[in-house]
Image (cartoon, helix red, strand yellow):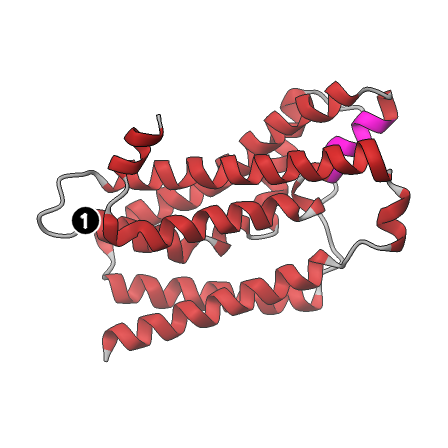
Amino acid sequence: MLPQIHSAILPDSLGNFLVMIGFGAYHGLNPAMGWLFALSLGLQQQNGRVVWISLFPIAAGHAASVVLVALIVLAGIRFVSSTALQILTAVVLLTFGIYKLFNYYRHPRWVGMKVGIRDLFVWSFLMATAHGAGLMVAPSLLGIAEEYCAPGVDAHPGTGLLLAVGLHTIAMFAVMGAVAWIVYKKLSLAVLRQKWINFDLIWAAALLLVGAIALFMAIRNEL
């Protein structure tokens, strides 16, 4: 499996793939992306298997949100110039980052604690979309799509985007599973009230940072 994945990654796109994996780990670390919900369900039912079972639809919902952005990127490169798309992505990221900076405490509320697999999937999709998880990785997805569309490259950009979303999701699942399991087995929810950091503010700052970098790269490429 690993040799096939390695052969499907273009050498020039390796950096963007690594960024996608890194953001996957970061998204998995954020309790708002789902591990806290899975942990709460496991503690409520006093069953560690519930924690793991809950993580699968949560990861799938997160992936669906990122796939939606990947499809927009895929459609965008057909009709809009690369530079215009980069600038548009940067402006949207900066605008959304500013909004989150002043509204970091707001979270979508849709379900209670009695949820099924479908509820967890839809909840995760809405949370990832509302918090801009897909938007955060849009510059990397755009970079991968451009590299797969380069002259002489015998690969469809959709292949690269699908692989990037898959690696992002695997990294996210691995990190959120590890964090949820450690807290479930060793720490319990009480530690979150005492020692857990405020990820909402860091998330807003990350959106602004990614937007600023994307804008800088777009301007530099234009000069």
- The number of discs equals 1
Location of residue 35 in the rendering, given as x and y in whole percent from the top left corner = 70, 37
Question: How busy is the neighbourhood of tag 1: few (under 14 within 10 Å), some, or many (20 plus)?
Answer: some
Q: Residue at horizontal 50%, vertical 50%?
A: 22
Q: Is residue 164 visible?
A: yes
Location of residue 189 in the rendering, given as x and y in whole percent from the top left corner = 86, 40
User: For residue 5: magenta?
Assistant: no
Residue 130 sits above or below residue 46 on the image: below
Q: Image quadrant for the N terminus?
A: top left
Residue range corresponding to the magenta coloring: 36-43
Q: Nearer the viewer, residue 30 or 2?
A: 2
Residue 120 sits above or below residue 126 on the image: above
Q: Residue furthest left?
A: 152
Quarter location, residue 198: bottom right
Location of residue 160 in the rendering, given as x and y in whole percent from the top left corner = 30, 41
Q: Nearer the viewer, residue 23 or 85?
A: 23
Q: Secondary structure at mark 1?
A: loop
**What main secondary structure does the magenta stretch of the protein show?**
helix
Q: Residue at horizontal 19%, vertical 49%?
A: 149
Q: Residue at horizontal 73%, vertical 26%?
A: 51
- From the image, tell me which residue sits under label 1: 149
For this view, does 169 lie left or right of residue 80? right
